[in-house]
Amino acid sequence: MTAGQTATEGQTVTVGQTVLEADGLTKHFPVGRRGGRVVHAVDDVTLTLRRGRVTALVGESGSGKSTVARLLAQLYPRTGGDIRLHGESVTVRRGRRFRAYARRVQMIFQDPFASLNPTHTIRYHLTRALRIHGNAGEGRAGLEQALTELLGKVSLTPAERYLDKYPHELSGGQRQRVAIARALAADPEALLADEPVSMLDVSIRLGVLNLLAELKERLHLAVLYITHDIASARYFADDTLVMYAGRMVEGGDSESVTQHPAHPYTRLLIASAPDPDRILGEVLPEELNDEDTGEPPSLIAPPSGCRFHPRCPAAMERCHDELPPRFDVPDSGTGHWAACWLYAEPAAGKEGDAA
Ligand SMILES: Nc1ncnc2c1ncn2[C@@H]1O[C@H](COP(=O)(O)OP(=O)(O)OP(=O)(O)O)[C@@H](O)[C@H]1O
Ligand SMILES: [Mg+2]
């Protein structure tokens, strides 16, 4: 076994190994009864989830984050693009192939109360999940052991204290832990967490985030962490991706993206985030466009060119009609990119470019 590899339950796992990839992922929802008009919820999203790493997906309300997660979980059919699990293209809708996919890619939702059935105990929820995924062990004793281990993984111990309770008898944080345990019952490789703490009291958010970080380490999960809160991405995620109006605008290691944001939209997000120890540097609110209404654009008729151009203080002529590709951000972390014309290479061969 080489460095970076560890054994979990008999299998060798390489930390950093690619689990799930999206390539050009696109989702347009039809609107209205007459055909033709669509909401451009997600356009051309490309991302990679790796074992033992948390990737944050950050953006304001309506930017398409949940749609990306639901596409990755194969809960929606996609309009375009590809999803690959261990390099293999997968499209599943229901039945046995869907369950086989869900065993490896699990999702947890914002509201643990809505995702647990109030008329059933914790034992019922977890037993059902273990059985569906064939992890309920042998006989009664096997099941009890599997249940105890599962609750242990989310630090709800001793298990007997929780198993026969109903969801309403638990606190919000405990309910979210049960929802996480239920996802872990599948023994997944990837966990898609859609705003997993935004409905919890501020005082218990950190505990649940720390639990996810611990699971990433211990079970080598590939975690997608969806959030509005870019400050928590810095704290908790290895990599950070920023979405605006259905498109990915910036990405890289979390430190680079949050401490040296390159895209004007990311700078706006950080300037409005309540993070006391961020380095403001050049990211001053005065830099923002006076005409900025603070409103995201219509996704039925999204702006041409760069979708952020109507709000962007640095917008240039070409931003109105040319869609910027990903450019490397110079002097920053490797792999730090921004889809912004500010980072376009100057045209080669011009005088004075010799250096
Ligand atoms: N089932 C649907 N039918 C039509 N439009 C939809 C549907 N689901 C999402 N949308 C639209 O797609 C866009 C992206 O929505 P999505 O829920 O992915 O955003 P989000 O980033 O998760 O927002 P929030 O932070 O509020 O959860 C929004 O304009 C939304 O109204
Ligand atoms: Mg959402």
Image (cartoon, helix red, strand yellow):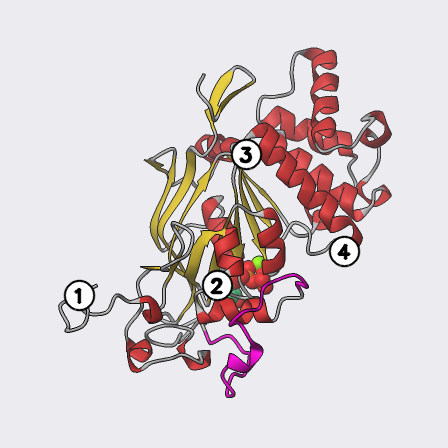
Which residue is nearer to you in this view: 129 or 87?
A: 87
- Front residue of 181/311: it is 311
Quote the CA–CA distance across marks 4 and 3. 25 Å
Q: Residues within 10 Å of mark 4 (few under 14, many from 20)?
A: few
| Pointer 1 or 3: first along the chain | 3
Task: Note whether 102 is above or below 160 in the view shown.
Answer: below
Q: Is residue 188 visible?
A: yes
Amino acid type at circle 4 is Val
Give the vertical position of 41 relative to 76 (above or below): below
Amino acid at circle 1: Ala
Tell me how far mark 4 sits from mark 2, CA to CA: 26 Å
- How far apart are the alpha carbons under marks 1 and 3? 47 Å
Q: Is residue 222 above or below residue 343?
A: above
Beta carbon at label 4 within 8 Å of ligand 1: no
In the rendered structure, which segment of residues is drawn in magenta? Answer: 275-298
Q: Look at discs 4 and 1 and give the one toward the viewer.
A: 1
Task: Please name the residue that numbered disc 4 is placed on.
Answer: 202
Asked whether disc 3 touches disc 2, contact meaning CB atoms under 8 Å apart, the reply is no
In which image quadrant can residue 202 be found? bottom right
Q: Which residue is mark 3?
A: 221
Label 4's element?
Answer: helix
| Sequence-first tag of 4 and 2 | 4
Residue 201 visible? The answer is no
* Residue at which label 2 appears: 261
